[in-house]
Amino acid sequence: MGRAMLIIVTGMLIALGYTFMGMSNQRQALTSQSVSKANKALAQNLAHSGLQFAIDKFNSDNSWVNSESTVDLEDGSIQIEVNTTGNPDIIKVNSTATMNGSDAEHKVVARYDISQKENLVPQFNSSLGIATDDFNFFLGGSSNINGYDETGQCEDRPGVEVKSSDGKSKVGENERIDGTPEDEASISGIEYDPYADLVKRLEDQPQTERISGNYKGDLGTEDDPGIFFIEDYTKLTGGISEGYGIMVVRAGGELDLEGELDVAGNFDFNGLVIFENAWEMDAKGTPTINGSVIVGSTEDQQVNIDINGNVQLQYDCTAHDYANMAAEKDLDADRIYKQLSIYE
Amino acid sequence: MNLGLTTSFIVAGILLLSILTMNMNLSQSSTQLTMRQITETKSNTINEILGKDIPNIGYKEVGAISSPIKDAQEGKIEFEGDIDNDGSEETVIWDYNSSDNTLTRDVGGTETTFKNVSNFEIEYFDSNRNSISPSLISTLLGGAQSERDKIRFIDISYTLQSKEKVGGLGSSNPEYIEVTWQKQFTPLNLRL
């Protein structure tokens, strides 16, 4: 019986071994199928990421065109390429991802319009934007703030916009505020950070002019708008009838002097005027600011906004171009990559 | 007869029968699995073609085609796009015929037919991932192009059957092996 049993058990083991080997092969085939699907999905994701890698590379070095580069990652690699097209405003980006240890591959071809650049100056949304809640507000004399469009090219906007309901109650009701809404401020949640960043970037640029004292020079022209920083007492003595670009009036550094702008005659400024940590505008003449005025604070201090005399603040969206032109002279605006098409 | 030898034969017989039964079951299961793999391979062909066509809806080299989806039904979609990236646009139609279980792909008049498709459904979604009713987008039901232009996501599902029926051990009711596939596409050119 012993020998017979031994033969039976051996036969059984061989039969079972054969069966399990067959099962193992099937399991392997199924696993391989799942891995293949996962690799394909990963390759697709990597190829799309490759577009971003290519744009980043081209953005940091515009001369990197018509040449390839490989990005090695843990699971695979991406071959990226930026090609010029017949149109200088359009680039073609190729991205091909391959997975390590697999034949999974995915290729994406996208075309981008690169003719546009981002605006360095935030869009104008009102005649006067108060981007702080810590302020006092007075609007009197013959001064007016007008958010209604007078160019025929802009939408009507608020005369005054503020951060919160607290700011709105500080502005209160005032019939000298025109726009949408009428006689009061609009709560837009305006933040000063974008303007603070702009001021910081502009302050040390070669074309930025610091003016003070009795100033008789020019304040920019329609074709050549400028950037002007006022950090000390400044009087625009007659003869300057207009200005274009960006004017920054702010408290002066270590001396802690409030920037002051004394406008003696009739004067029109077209563009953006930023009052940073300060508001001192003494108008004996009839200054008009076409564009937008922003008041903000980078320090924990109250800003006293006292608009008296005959100051006219007029919202004008077209004046944004002068401000942007002035900023672009020194600063390199980021390119906008507008995707035109994508093929995969 | 020797009692030991008899017992050994009985035990061996039982074991042999068990192994035979198991092997037959495994063989049957293996047949089903093989049939499933064959069906899946066929399904992969459809997936790959759909995966090439649908993401490229509205594609052309410079600037996406405006209003590329010409018809959007539950079992049919017609769209334009340069799907082979050769610089010329093609009109592509995927159409399901439930009466003979065939799915047809037509590219500029050249047809490819896939058989044994027991179910094929397309669902359309707008930019907020809200499903768009076929009555608004189907040409058959008087749907408007302006509504079809709102399509941003396309969900496609289908079921592919094996060519032959496969039954279990001793089963008198063999069945088709079915592979179901589903995917939501986001054709990027529809957003440009």
Image (cartoon, rainbow, N blue to C red):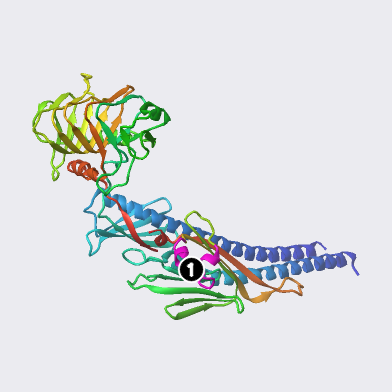
Q: Bounds of the magenta span?
A: B133-150
Residue B65, by quadrant, is bottom left
- Identify which residue, B98 or A246, lies in the foreground: A246
- Identify which residue, A218 or A175, lies in the foreground: A175
Residue B45 pos. (x, y %): 50, 71
Figure quadrant of the N terminus of chain A: bottom right
**What kind of residue is marked 1?**
Leu
Residue to which mark 1 is pinned: B50
Q: Is residue A172 left or right of residue A84?
A: right
Q: Secondary structure at mark 1?
A: helix
Residue A234 highlighted magenta (yes or no) = no
Residue B133 pos. (x, y %): 55, 63
- Identify which residue, B74 or A114, lies in the foreground: B74
Residue A19 pos. (x, y %): 67, 65
Residue A50 against residue A190 in the figure, above or below:
below
Residue A292 pos. (x, y %): 26, 38
Figure quadrant of the C terminus of chain A: bottom left
Q: Is residue A105 left or right of residue A129?
A: right
- What is the crowding at mark 1: few (fewer than 14 residues within 10 Å), some, or many (at least 20)? some
Residue B142 highlighted magenta (yes or no) = yes
- Identify which residue, A23 or A178, lies in the foreground: A178
